[in-house]
Image: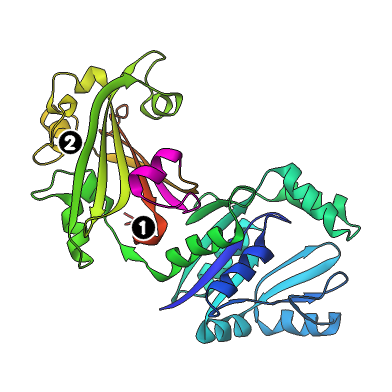
Amino acid sequence: MSRGVILYGPPASGKDTVTAALRTLDPTFTLFARLKAGPGRTHGYRMIDDSELERIRHSGEIIWANERYGATYVVDRGALADSLVRGVPVLHLGQVEAIAEVLAATPGTRWTTVSLRCPREVGEARIAARATGDLPARMIAWDRTEPLPNADLVIDTALTTPGEAARLIFAAVSRTHSSDSNRYTQPQPTDAWAAEAAAQGKVGTQRLLVVETVPASDEVRTALRISAGAHVVVRRRLILADEKPVEVAASFYPASIAAGTPLAENKKIRGGAVRILADVGLPLEESIERVTAERPTAEDVVVLNIAADEPLIVIRRVSAPQGREPVEYAVNRMVSSRVTPLEYRMRTD
């Protein structure tokens, strides 16, 4: 299966800079130069005139076209197909609809979609520094750029260096592994992580770091939909592959549910925490996951034995019995260079 990267974001969110860093990291990553007809910069585009644009419009070659800054930008079918054969194209897009069109046109390709963002004032300063004379038009384009709801990675380029962003993207593209989240929301006969690691040819273990009852933070309270001042039981584990730390996992449960059960005991649970929830009539039947790219905290650096600039992939999962309030909030902070990012699959009824 061919592979490609879509960098999505408003003007000056860092698409060119991150693409250059990817190219430095691995030369198989190459900017896909879109066709362009009209004024403005020419670097990074394949320039055409209006007559050629009209010919292409009638040829059926256009996957996506949009107009901006008085010019027309085109993703053309033949050139994109050629780039997918030669390497890993990096395609810059700024419209959600464009991504859908590209995915539909290339069914045999696994695209990694990356949402690049930064504060508006940072973007404005970057545009002003270019001195291209079109700041107002580019800020209008900035404001019209919609959030990308289902990106594989979300990277804030004001907080993440181009090199860090490139490493995150490289890991997501080149080390994909299919993982079934049901392992962690349904009771299993064996340790879920041990089974997943074994499928990757590794030995998976985990160490229980702490089990404690604490006041719920705002993040946890919002996820579990519990009242201010409520307490939660938190179970923190260090996840290892071949004895090397790869992840810190924390699971939070309302104290009103977990108190007096093995969830609140400072020891491992045979069959996992999800078995206890199922035993008390609270099976995890609905889950929502959110995946982000983040910098490590000072605690992450120590516990995971990583550098302060090592990017983390963070998965936050809220789980609940069907039609009821959430009973588990899981936060998994994974070292991007040591894990295989998840590939999500859906079944439609």
Res. 93 visible in picture: no
Q: Residue at x 81, y 54 (%)?
A: 127
Q: Residue at x 64, y 70 (%)?
A: 20
From what the image shows, is residue 149 above or below residue 18? above
- Mark 2 and mark 1: span between their CA atoms? 23 Å
* Residue type at the position of mark 2: Ala
Q: Residue at x 86, y 73 (%)?
A: 38
Q: Which image quadrant is residue 60 in? A: bottom right
Q: Which image quadrant is residue 213 in? A: top left
* Relative image position of residue 160 (x, y in whole percent): 58, 52
Front of the two marks 2 and 1: 2
* Relative image position of residue 87 (x, y in whole percent): 52, 82
Q: Which residues are magenta?
A: 297-314
Q: Which image quadrant is residue 222 in? A: top left
Res. 326 visible in picture: yes
Q: Residue at x 52, y 61 (%)?
A: 113
Q: Circle 2 — which element? A: helix
Residue projecting furthest to the top: 229
Q: Which residue is mark 1?
A: 344
Tell whether position 312 is magenta. Answer: yes
Q: Which residue is mark 2?
A: 273
Tell whether position 102 is magenta. Answer: no
* Relative image position of residue 75 (x, y in whole percent): 66, 74
From the viewer's perspective, tell me whether residue 191 is left or right of residue 77: left
From the viewer's perspective, tell me whether residue 193 is left or right of residue 7: left
Front-most of 176 and 70?
176
